Image: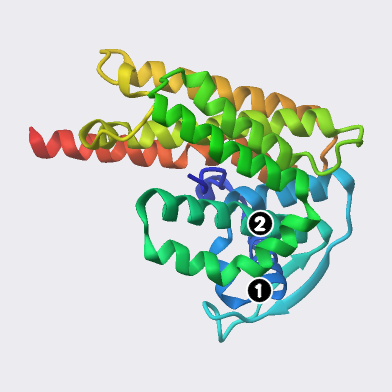
Amino acid sequence: MLGYITINRDDLKVKDLDVYQSFYCGICHDIKARSGQLARFTLSYDMTFLAMVLTGLYDEKLKRQKRRCMLHPLVKKTCVSNKYTEYAADMCVILTYHNLMDDWHDEKKRKSVFYADVIRKSYKKAASKYPRQTKAVIKYIRKLHKVEKSKDYNIDLASGLTGEMFKEIFTYNEDDIWSRDLSALGFYLGKFIYLMDAYDDVYEDRKTGNYNPFIKEAGREDFEQYAKSILIMMISEASRAFERLPVVDFVDILRNILYSGVWSKYWLHQNRKERRKKTEG
């Protein structure tokens, strides 16, 4: 489900792309330092966005280093790090661990339980440091299972659960003056992520019988416009919350993500649909 909160590379200046990449690589190295080499698979674009928001909001200094990695063994990449990239690294591990265990309990995927075992020690360390956020993830998975089992197709209910989880993750400090707007940003981004994922899978889920809150609406003639209007509503609310935050640094990159990048997979979906029409025609 993660991975929707990313950049639109075509609309980003080269210097801004370099900055974004330095955060992405920095979080990757933070994950390695805190959780080991194999834990790097937990890295997500969504948490990269969060690290940039928090760094820009609180004007936290960044430590810059040139590093090599397995993907780039010959060329050193610029990596930035601070307490917010480390926080993002821990959230990557917490989210991925519970997603893996959920896959194991639901579908008995041996690969999932293997990778969960790989990061279990790191997960426990991160969970003990961030009990509020960890509790929110556990609560989210438990409640979502109930919704799926009951076949409740209330779109706000299912997406709202994801929103509540992301609200807690985006709220770095509950007592901070900006916690309310960070919570709103996380809440609506969470809803958008869930609904975009559901939209992307709806036709496949109709075939397989998997739960999807859009299934009952997917047969409507105006379904595409209906779904798009809901997605626009969610990302608009998230953008309003972001614009209330006094973020100055990286603002062009963050706006690129919120106003353009988040739609990348939507347009991929549309392109796939057009190709299918041409093939069938």
Mark 1 vs 2, N-terminal side: 2
**Position of residue 167 in the picture relative to residue 138 (left or right):** right
- Locate residue 234: give its quadrant: top right
Q: Mark 1 to mark 2: distance in Å?
A: 19 Å
- Locate residue 254: give its quadrant: top right
11 in relation to 205, above or below: below
Question: Which residue appears at 54% of the width and 81% of the height?
Answer: 70
Q: Residue furthest left?
A: 281
Question: Which residue appears at 76% of the width and 66% of the height?
Answer: 80
Q: Looking at the rendered structure, which numbered label has been put on residue 20?
A: 2
Q: Position of residue 213 (x, y in %)?
A: 40, 25
Q: Position of residue 23 (x, y in %)?
A: 69, 60
Question: Which residue appears at 38% of the width and 17% of the height?
Answer: 225
What residue would you read off at disc 1?
32
Q: Nearer the viewer, mark 1 or mark 2?
A: 1
Nearer to us in this view, 203 or 104: 104
Residue count near mark 2 (Cα–Cα under 10 Å), binned few <14, some 14–19, many ≥20 = many
Secondary structure of residue under mark 2: helix
92 in relation to 270, above or below: below
14 in relation to 25, above or below: above
Picture mark count: 2
Secondary structure of residue under mark 1: helix
Q: Position of residue 280 (x, y in %)?
A: 9, 35
Visible in this render: residue 17?
no
Contact? badges 1 and 2 (CB < 8 Å): no
What is the three-letter code of the residue carrying label 2? Answer: Tyr
What is the three-letter code of the residue carrying label 1? Answer: Lys
**Position of residue 2 in the picture relative to residue 133 (left or right):** left
Quarter of the image with the C terminus in it? top left
Question: Which residue appears at 72% of the width and 45% of the height?
Answer: 133
115 in relation to 232, above or below: below
